[in-house]
Image (tube, rainbow, N blue to C red):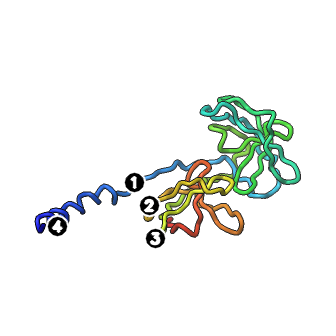
Amino acid sequence: MKKYHILSLFSVPFLLVPCTNLVDVSAKTTTYNFFPTDNGPIDTSYSGTVTTVGDRPFLTLYAFNDNRFSLIRNRALAPKTAWFYDQTVSRNGEIYYRVATNEWIKYDEIEGFSGHHNRKHFEKKTVTLRVRPVLPAPVFDGNFNDTGKTLAVGSEWIAFEKPVYFGGNAYYQIGKDEFVAGERVINLH
């Protein structure tokens, strides 16, 4: 019986070693040619071309009415196509480009752009977050619904520096359509 206890005592640390390693997570920093003021007026001082991403069958278009964006359900853009834009606007942390009369595409659905009037420069910065001790942090989608996924206690994640706000609470974007509540993480910068 003593052999079993001694053997168990020495084997437990070896079993826990793989569980204590942190995984390095990195994210690219995206550089914009300009910085439209969030929730500000439509900016007509920039124009150029945007190229849609190639990893989706179609890219979503939005209409801009009454200072709000709504999904256009009967039209979309093809992947890997270039479109002229003549206006930009930012709403709730999302940047949109106007590619046709009242048809806008989000920044995250383009993979390249060129433009004119590049006097201003903006870089979407990232921060490192650590999940607070005690409970795992739930992951929410872009509509702030619980996805059923969780982030492990003590794990570290790269997120965009500026949180988005919903229902008076701050959320950090940690992935495409993935958010974590600010109260569940520690900002390590």
Q: Residues within 10 Å of mark 2 (few under 14, many from 20)?
A: some
Q: Amino acid at mark 3?
A: Val
Label pair 3/4, CB-CB below 8 angstroms: no
Give the residue pinned by disc 3: 134
Q: CA distance from mark 1 to mark 3?
A: 19 Å
Decide if residue 68 is on the left or right side of residue 132. right
Q: Nearer the viewer, mark 3 or mark 4?
A: 4
Label 4, on which residue? 5
Mark 1 vs 2: CB contact within 8 A: yes
User: Left or right: 10 with respect to 147?
Assistant: left
Does label 1 or label 2 sit earlier along the sequence? 1
Q: Nearer the viewer, residue 51 or 108?
A: 108
Image coords of residue 120 (percent x, y)? 69, 52
Comes first in the chain, label 4 or label 1 = 4
Query: In percent of the image, x 66 and y 68: which residue is there?
Result: 169
- The amino acid type of the residue labelled 4 equals His
Kindly identify which residue carries mark 1. Answer: 23
Of tags 1 and 3, which is closer to the observer?
A: 3
Residue 147: x and y, percent?
Answer: 59, 53
The residue labelled by disc 2 is 155
Compute the Cα span from label 2 to label 4: 32 Å
Q: Secondary structure at mark 1?
A: loop
**Dot 1: few (<14), some (14–19), or many (≥20) neighbours within 10 Å?**
few
